[in-house]
Image (cartoon, grey):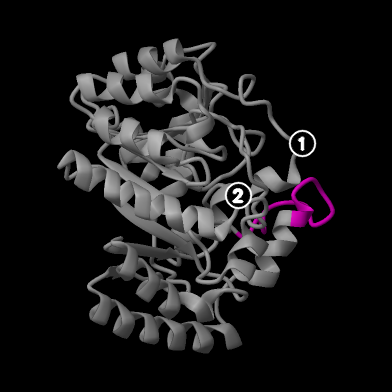
Amino acid sequence: MPTDLVPPLPETLQVEVTSACNLRCAMCLVRYRPPVNKLAGAMPLAMLRGLLDDLPGLRQLTLQGLGEPLLAPDLLPMVRYAKQRGVRVGFNSNATLLNARRAAELVDSGLDWLHVSIDGARATTYEGIRDGASFDTVVGNLAGLAEAKRAAGSATPWIRAVFVAMRRNVAQLPELVALLGRIGVSELRVQNLSHSFADTDPAGAYREIRQYAEDEALWGGDDESAAADAFAQARDAASRAGVTLRLPSTEPRPDSRCGWPWEAAYVTSAGVVQPCCMVMGDDRIALGRLSEQSFPDIWGGPAYREFRRRLAGDDPPDVCRGCALYQGTF
């Protein structure tokens, strides 16, 4: 891990283009907060442009946060502005709104990658997690995006499916691998829940999502064996289907560390600068606000320097202690 407290400006950035979402997913903070209007929750295009202009060395931009990027009114102009700057750009989507028109627009925009969340191989399981979504619609939209690429003769966007492994769905992983192979999706990333929220008050504002993580996370115990079995079957299925499969660890690695605050940053739709996307909730930590300072000033400011100092040592910030990336299980 780097130890310098003011590294060069990052080449990688993640921006929440909207905090609004059309789903209420069981493992997402959005479910446990009041709904956000898609206009009120959108990052202004001018803010995104100003942010990119402050980062001349930017190479990669991810346009996602807690909300659904396809709800962002200025999503396509944002993609195009980044592409004009020579920046690779993509985002993660629940794909419920990814109809044929949207798929064609995204292919035409030059979007480099699109990750689609699909947390089950059967409608009952998937829809029980992604509350408000239709399994058949999402699978159809995924297949439609692959077809839009073929129709345009385009190699982009690269399509990757993302599966959040939990106690309730991990057994369906091999079945999902086979399904993705049939519809033309050639990569699947499996990840654990991002945070335990163990640093929060058990009776406080994060109690519900904290309890959900405790009930569903595959972090050791009896679940480790069940997950290992599902992962082994998924590897076999991936080999047969020609799907590239990335699997997480289910056992924390005490030597794991995080490089986010030296290499990248996360900015919410309201312009709050946070150390990473794993934190969830801009009330948990703020290293600066774009309404008050430029990004370079925040990046080199005292809050960021102190955060890096603690993360590089043996007394990490509280928000990092329950993070799956910090623990090496993401």
- Considering only vertical position in the picture, is 121 above or below 201? below
Residue 307 visible? The answer is yes
Residue range highlighted in magenta: 196-208
Kind of residue indicated by mark 1:
Pro
Q: Percent x, y for residue 274? A: 50, 34
Magenta region includes residue 75: no
Identified at 74% across, 46% down, the residue is 32
Q: Position of residue 110 (x, y in %)?
A: 23, 31
Residue of label 1: 34
Residue 160's spot in the image, x, y percent?
A: 33, 55
Q: Nearer the viewer, residue 144 or 89?
A: 144
Query: Which SS class for mark 2?
Result: helix
Say whether disc 1 or disc 2 marks the residue closer to the N-terminus: 1
Examine the rendered structure and indicate whether residue 86 appears above or below residue 266: above
User: Magenta segment: does it hold 197?
Assistant: yes
> Relative to 162, does residue 96 appear above or below in the rendering?
above
Q: Is residue 50 left or right of residue 303?
A: left
Q: Which residue is mark 2?
A: 318
Residue 52 in percent (x, y) is at: 32, 19
Mark 2 is on which residue type? Answer: Asp
Report the magenta stretch's main SS: loop
Relative to 297, is 203 on the left or the right?
A: right
> Would you say residue 251 is visible in this rendering?
no
Q: Quadrant of the C terminus?
A: bottom left
Q: Residue at x 56, y 40 (%)?
A: 66
Dot 1 lies on which element? Answer: loop
Instruction: Please name the residue shown 67% across and 63% down the image.
Output: 128
Q: From this viewpoint, which residue is outermost toward the right? A: 203
Above or below for 207 versus 13: below
